[in-house]
Image: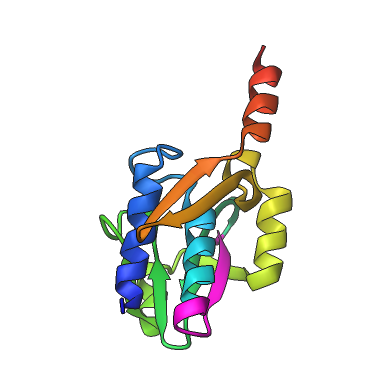
Amino acid sequence: MFSARDLALRVNRGLKNSKCFTENLVGSCAVGSHIFVEEYRKHFGDIDLVLAYQKGNDYNAHCWAETKDKIIDVSAIQLFISDNVYIAPIQMMDIAYSIYRPLHRNKQALTSINTTWHVSQRINSFRWRWKDDRLILSRKKSWTRSLLSNLS
């Protein structure tokens, strides 16, 4: 059996190895958090996908996962909080994530991400699978073709 931390690290490695994102995982928080939440629910139980916006800036958003007592951020490197994953007591939310205000959770978060975020960051723009405990992540081709055709 593996721990929630092991799962978070597997998702983080999958994001980094996918070549879908920059080295510091900019743009990966939604898909990474969603994958983590789905797998966590299968193995450990209740958890929420959280979508938050920076206070005073509705264009700067971030996603992470929360249990009743922990925050788990598989793409915390974007925020310079950790090189890999950030797992801390929920009380640390006010310190580490003080610039964000949570706006949506779970299905409402998914709907918002998949309809209002740039297509390159939408969860429904990716496909993934697990192979030998490794996350294999890739972009769906349909949005890539349409983006490239708009550039020409």
Residue 60 x/y as whole percent? 55, 51
Please tell me which residue lies in front, 11 or 65.
11
Residue 120 x/y as whole percent? 59, 39
Q: Is residue 114 above or below residue 94?
A: above
Q: What range of the chain is rendered magenta?
A: 41-55
In reply to whether residue 43 is colored magenta, the answer given is yes
Tell me what residue is drawn at x 35 percent, y 46 percent. Answer: 16
Residue 49 x/y as whole percent? 56, 70
Q: Is residue 67 above or below residue 75?
A: below
Most extreme residue toward the left is 83
Q: Which corner quadrant holds the C terminus?
A: top right
Tell me what residue is drawn at x 57 percent, y 48 percent. Answer: 127
Residue 102 x/y as whole percent? 57, 70
Most extreme residue toward the front is 132
Tell me what residue is drawn at x 70 percent, y 58 percent. Answer: 112
Tell me what residue is drawn at x 72 percent, y 60 percent. Answer: 111
* Colour scheme shown: rainbow
Instruction: Report whether 71 appears left or right of 115.
Output: left
